[in-house]
Image (cartoon, helix red, strand yellow):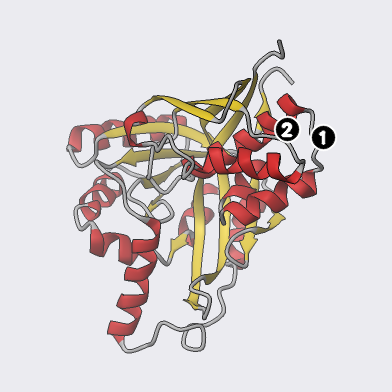
Amino acid sequence: MTRPVTARVPAKVNVQLAVGGLRPDGFHDLANVFLAVGLHDEVTATPADSLRLTVEGADAGQVPLDRTNLAARAASALAERHGIAPDVHLHIAKDIPVAGGMAGGSADAAGALLACDALWGTKATRAELLEICADLGSDIPFSLVGGVALGRGRGELLTPLETGGTFHWVFAVADGGLSTPAVYRECDRLREASGAGASAADVPEPEPSEALLDALRTGDATALAAAVSNDLQPAALSLRPALADTLRAGADAGALASLVSGSGPTCAFLAKDTEAAQAVAGALTASGTCRTVRITSGPVPGARLVGA
């Protein structure tokens, strides 16, 4: 019997998320600077008589076990391309917060692709895997690539970015999730309400911050903190006002920067070093403004086969 194959895939934080106006196709152009951090899910692919999913770990009960699951869709897409049946048991060991704006579902899809490719011997090229990723979702290509990258288009067109050091992060995980489409709709609504307009014709083309790119290149955490931004943060705060208390608690504890991660509701805090991260995490835990707190650092590599 073929041995199981396991892929390990990181979470991400958006150090810049610049959101363009609403396009006719319902999407938004982005300038999305992803940074992979050391919280990982593991996806194990084992031969089976049909496609089956199991999940363990924090918030496993919130993860769909049917074919709407991105990992299941990834396995099916790879199998279809190569003319084989998607007969595999995918077991996901979750450590990335579910529906937390850290691309946990996207990570699972990238992990499933890599693991199934190895299990089935489909020998897909990197370009083919990235194409499948992009078809499935905007964040999935980055989960495969990792490190630090600029995402254009919907976020799926990636350019790797140079980084000069390690950045220390604290993540405050909220109770319950936030729907990414709902956050984008709220972003559009707030733009319309301001009178500025929400369409692609109304909103300037999103561009990466040169100051942010320079800070990443030099590994300067203080400069990075001054440049981080998230255009979806007002919408996330509008839908979940209590997140403002979490952001304030982290800032008061000495975080260099405090921001909602992606579409939220996880909040991300950039710290000067490991010791400062511990202090921020302790204050956030004591504040009672979040469900749990995680400390990690990045950048880290993208999806990798365990033992490979």
Number of other residues with Cα within 10 Å of mark 2, as a class: few under 14, some 14 to 19, many 20 or more: many
Q: Report the front residue among 91 and 19.
A: 91
Q: Residue 16 location in percent, x, y?
A: 51, 60
Under mark 2, the amino acid is Asp
Q: Residue at coordinates 61% horizontally, 26% vertically from top-left?
A: 88
| Helix, strand or loop at mark 2 | helix
Of residue 205 and residue 285, the one placed in the foreground of this image is 205
Confirm whether residue 216 shows in the render.
Answer: yes
Instruction: In this rendered view, identify the residue nearer to me: 262 or 56.
Output: 56
User: Which percent across, then down, holds residue 37?
Assistant: 53, 38
Residue in the picture at 60% in, 21% down: 48
Where does residue 2 sit, x and y in percent of width and height?
Answer: 72, 14
Asked if residue 149 shows in the view, the reply is no
Distance Cα–Cα, label 2 vs label 1: 6 Å
Residue at far top of view: 1
Quadrant position of residue 74: top right
Discs 2, 1 touching: Cβ within 8 Å: yes
On screen, 257 above or below 1? below
Read off the residue under disc 1: 123
The residue under label 2 is: 117
Determine whether, in the image, residue 171 is placed left or right of residue 150.
Answer: left
